[in-house]
Amino acid sequence: MKYRSIAVLLTAALTSGLCLAQTAAVEDFKKTPTTQQEKEYPQVNSERKVRVSIPAPEAQRVQLDIGGVKYDLKKDEKGVWTGESAPQDEGFHYYQLNIDGASVPDPGSLYYYGASRWGSGIEIPAKDQDFYAVKNVPHGQLREMQYYSNTTKSVRRVYIYTPAGYDKDSKKYPVLYLQHGMGENETGWGNQGHAGLIMDNLIAEGKAVPFIIVMENSSINMSGMPRGPRPAGAPRPGAGQPNAAPPAPGNGPRMAGPGGGINFAAEFEKILFNDLIPFVESNFRVVGDQAHRAMAGLSMGGMQTHSIVVANPDKFAYVGMFSSGTFVPSEIKDIDSFKKNTKVVFMSFGGREGGSARIGEAAEEWTKVGIKGVSYVSPETAHEWQSWRRSLHEFAPLLFK
């Protein structure tokens, strides 16, 4: 009984954010690229601890909610609440403040769309952040476009990355259709993912050929969606990223956990082939054939990619699944025809995700049938944007060569 009481106390302390084992923070906190201009907080120190501060003199309790843990802040004599988290993983993280039980964005941070709402995000400096840094290299454009979808009977927004030089030359370019995760939208890869900067740097270094990237909103209404099989190792919604969420035609993958069995690709597949690809190929200088078309996505977006490629094996020559389970040759009905036109199947996971142990063998299966199978595991990251930034950085150099 004594030991049980101690366990209950410890659990209560940790849940409330007291963090008994947390030591005093090193006082070298600095603002981050995700801190709003003319704001002093949020900040990050060399230990990767996040410090926030907010005036709320009437509040009784204020907490920082990040990484699935809530940390109590302390109020000074002016009614300003300040405190910090335990060390966080490198890369980008969604977070929020909790003021007397109400979860709200931090007014000091820039806002990002994740977990189906606009909220706070913070960048924890990474050892390898150079590959998405802003450098003195030729830069492409991230274009915000609107087009009409006959499928949804609405005007939709799409972001399209065009590489440096697109407006000065007359050549045609390959295209990558790149999808976000569940609870995110078409802004994710450009904002949180730094897709444009990753491509600018790869192209400048001669590591990737220039190509166009199309980023649309493939979020779905989960009610009444058709069912389909789930790919091996697919994550459940929210896995590894508490304030963002992951997870996809007819035989598509489904998610485990909440919403399990839902086909996440059915609606977006119609938009993609009936509206989006025709819009891109009518308004941009692209090569409109399978050999010059790729599709990839993170979590839900990768599962949608998997589902769409299985149902339409003649549309994409390059396939990328980031934190989205595995894809194996036995899923393709006519593998002999498929391997004539498909060049690469790429699968990745964060090293702290359970699925990372299975993708190596799946990649080898593709290589054995004559298609280049590639697996990549992001060191010391979970279901989060640093895993997916690194995945794009590894995937892009494989395309259209």
Image: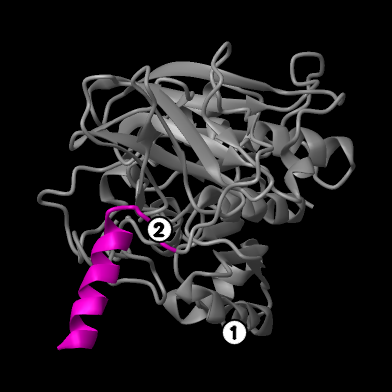
Q: Quadrant of the N terminus?
A: bottom left
What secondary structure is marked by label 2? Answer: loop
Residue 92 in the image, given as x and y percentages of width and height: 55, 43
- Say few, some or many: other residues with alpha carbon within 10 Å of mark 1 (under 14 / 14 to 19 / 20 or more): some
| Residue 202 picture quarter | top right
- Residue at figure coordinates x 56%, y 46% from the top left: 49
Colouring: one colour
Question: Which of the two residues, 147 or 99, is positioned nearer the viewer here?
Answer: 99
Q: Are marks 1 and 2 in contact (CB under 8 Å)?
A: no
| Residue type, numbered disc 1 | Glu
Among numbered discs 1 and 2, the one appearing first in the sequence: 2
Residue 170 in the image, given as x and y percentages of width and height: 78, 19
Instruction: Please state the extent of the stretch shown in magenta in the rendering.
Output: 1-20
**Residue situated furthest front in the rendering:** 77
Which residue does the numbered mark 2 point to in the structure image?
A: 19
Question: Can residue 66 be seen at all in this image of the molecule?
Answer: yes
Q: How far apart in space, not on screen, are marks 1 and 2 (Cα)?
A: 40 Å
| Residue type, numbered disc 2 | Cys
Circle number at residue 288: none
Figure check: 342 above or below 292: below
Q: Is residue 9 magenta?
A: yes
**Is residue 26 shown left or right of residue 359?**
right
Residue 210 in the image, given as x and y percentages of width and height: 77, 36
**Closer to the eye: label 1 or 2:** 2
**Is residue 140 shown left or right of residue 100?**
right
Principal secondary structure, stretch drawn in magenta: helix
- Residue at figure coordinates x 49%, y 70% from the top left: 353
What secondary structure is marked by label 1? Answer: helix
- Residue at figure coordinates x 27%, y 54% from the top left: 16
Which residue does the numbered mark 1 point to in the structure image?
A: 361
Question: Which of the two residues, 6 or 36, is positioned nearer the viewer here?
Answer: 6
**Is residue 13 shown left or right of residue 329?**
left
